[in-house]
Image: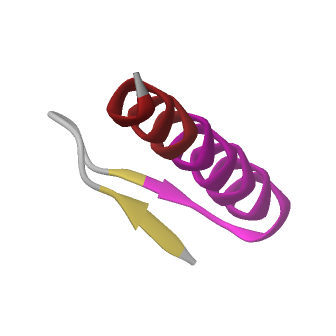
Amino acid sequence: MAVIKRKKPVVLTGHSAATFLKSKLVNEEKIQKRIELCKKK
């Protein structure tokens, strides 16, 4: 079970939680890559 902290707490169970966490991780990786690219310039 995962609790996502937003304005309203969202509680996800099972598959939806896994999907959400995966998409969140992917987004964080993309942001990290963008930050690295910006630093290189």
Quarter holding the N terminus is bottom right
Q: Quadrant of the C terminus?
A: top left
Magenta stretch holds residue 16 = yes
Q: In this view of the protein, which residue sits in the foreground, 13 or 21?
A: 21
Point 25% across, 53% down: residue: 5
Q: From what the image shows, is residue 24 above or below residue 30?
A: below
* Vertical comparison of 28 with 13: above or below: above
Above or below, comparing residue 7 to residue 38 in the picture: below
Q: Position of residue 11 (x, y in %)?
A: 46, 58
Model colouring = secondary structure
Residue 14 as seen in the image, left or right of residue 11: right
Residue at far front of view: 41
Residue drawn at the location 39% of the way across and 65% of the way down: 3
Say above or below: 2 vs 38: below
Which of the pair 14/18 is nearer the observer?
A: 18
Q: Residue at x 66, y 48 (%)?
A: 20
Give the residue at x 60% y 48%.
Answer: 29
Which residue is most to the left?
A: 7
User: How many discs appear?
Assistant: 0
In the picture provided, is 17 more to the left or to the right than 37? right
Which residue extends farthest right? 15
Q: Which residues are magenta?
A: 11-30
Q: Residue 9 lies in magenta, yes or no?
A: no
- Magenta region, main secondary structure: helix
Whole-percent x and y of residue 24?
A: 58, 47
Most foreground residue, 5 or 39: 39
Residue 23 quadrant: top right
Quadrant position of residue 30? top right
